[in-house]
Amino acid sequence: MQTLIQSVLTLQNGTLEAVDVLLMGDRIHTVAPAHTLPVAAHQRLIDGSDRLLLPGFVNGHTHSSQVWQRGLIPQLPLELWLANVFESTPRQLEQFYWGAVSTAVDTLLSGGTCVMDHAYVIPGQEMETVEALVRGYKAVGIRAVIAPLIQDLPFASGFPQGCLLPQGASPRSAVALLGMMADIVTTFHDPANGIYIGVGPTGFHRCSDQLLAGCQELSDRHHLCYHTHLLETRAQHRLAQESYGISAVQHLHNLGCLTPRTSVAHGVWIDEGDIQILAEAGATLVHNPVSNLRLGSGLAPILRCRQRGLNVSFGCDGAASNDAQNLLEAIKLGTILHRVADDDYDHWLTPEQTLQMATAGGARGVNLADRTGTLAPGMAADLVLYNLNHPSMLPRNHPLQLLVLGRPTDVVETVWVNGKTIVDQGQVQTIDVNALHHILARSVGAQGNQQTQHHPVEPHYRQVMIHGPGEGR
Ligand SMILES: [Zn+2]
């Protein structure tokens, strides 16, 4: 199967150029100046005029099952928000299947071809949950990395001075969790079919050193992405000081957990030394600007990360802390948000830079830089064709600037993943999207089950984080 996309605009070496692109099988075969590739009879020919072709974005951090909690959780900071999320988390395997389908669809229709699902898994049904997620992603045909969330410390351990809280039931031991992860890798890691397993310890705040280091051994043994939450909130920053007396980043580095296969979500509270350690390790920081604002977590020091050479990519984070899964929205915010942190406009991110972060940077963050994220011969044909005639992309001043800084809607026309057409004429081809919407519409349980603002951990949180001694960065 060959597809020739003729004379299409793309971003090459930082600037817009018109090119011909030949797709052959699952790969990009040729990229050449516009109107230079011959047309063969057996090719599908796509007129690229008034179109923009980009490598697919990578949604570098999300939690697919939170689709069911979209618009549900009250306006709370992470630690209290999380208590609500745990209580309303889905329990049915089919909800996980549809959560993956919904996340995949939203990713595709906002320019993504790959998703990192830092996946909640049902305790006691971990294999079945991953199976449901794999089934969902394969049904849609998106490239997916599934990193099951694992933790061996109780919920209360994630709070500073958490020992004052009643301890919940202890999760499974590090040994048991690592054994389970080994089984999940053996059963589901399937790069040939675009499904990858990552190791996803929840974060240092709920994981023992044994678990954090054990995950690294698994990552080394199977060449897996190592994905974890890191210093999302001021509370976590305080907790690290309490627990280790050194920064959480230094601690992870001492455990050997920072390598080029590592991606850390958030990093809102990392400092200059942390940035240097992460950059030297070749790790990736996944920036989730919508979530960080929704939860009031803070502004990640993205400009300084980039200046220090740290790879930065974008994530939506789960729909419980974003209430949508729109990559273009995350990229827009990530592009303009950090201007308020630096008066020197020479440092401000440009649309060209953030598109690079979302594509090649994103691919690196999920350990797939040799496979996806770049429009070049030999790379997987993971591509998105945008319609520049859509009213939200007019007038035709600067397509990249409008795509990133505007509010593009329904502009994704065609999406290929591994050379297969997954979206055509703006419609997902592989699954029945109406069935998905029907299933979501039937979920009315949440309305009769309004989440309370007040949770047993709230007095402790207020005492420690609101009324306690102030502590800056
Ligand atoms: Zn997250």
Image: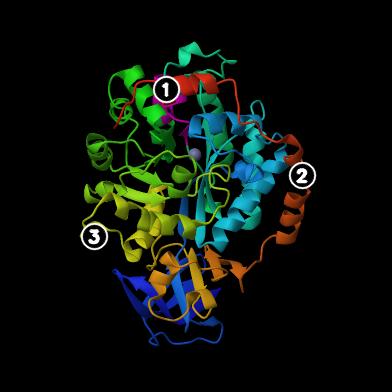
Q: Amino acid at mark 1?
A: His
Q: Is residue 35 above or below residue 192?
A: below
**Which is in the foreground here, disc 1 or disc 3?**
1
Measure how far apart labels 2 and 1 are at the Cα level: 38 Å
Residue 372 visible in the picture:
no
- Residue at image mark 3: 345
Q: Decide which of 302, 190 is in the foreground and name it.
A: 302
Provide the residue span drawn in magenta.
199-215
Residue at 60% in and 15% down = 169
Circle number at residue 467: 1
* Local SS, label 2: loop
Q: Decide which of 327, 207 is in the foreground and name it.
A: 327
Measure how far apart labels 1 and 3 are at the Cα level: 37 Å
- Residue at image mark 2: 444
Dot 2 or dot 1, earlier in sequence: 2
Q: Amino acid at mark 3?
A: Tyr
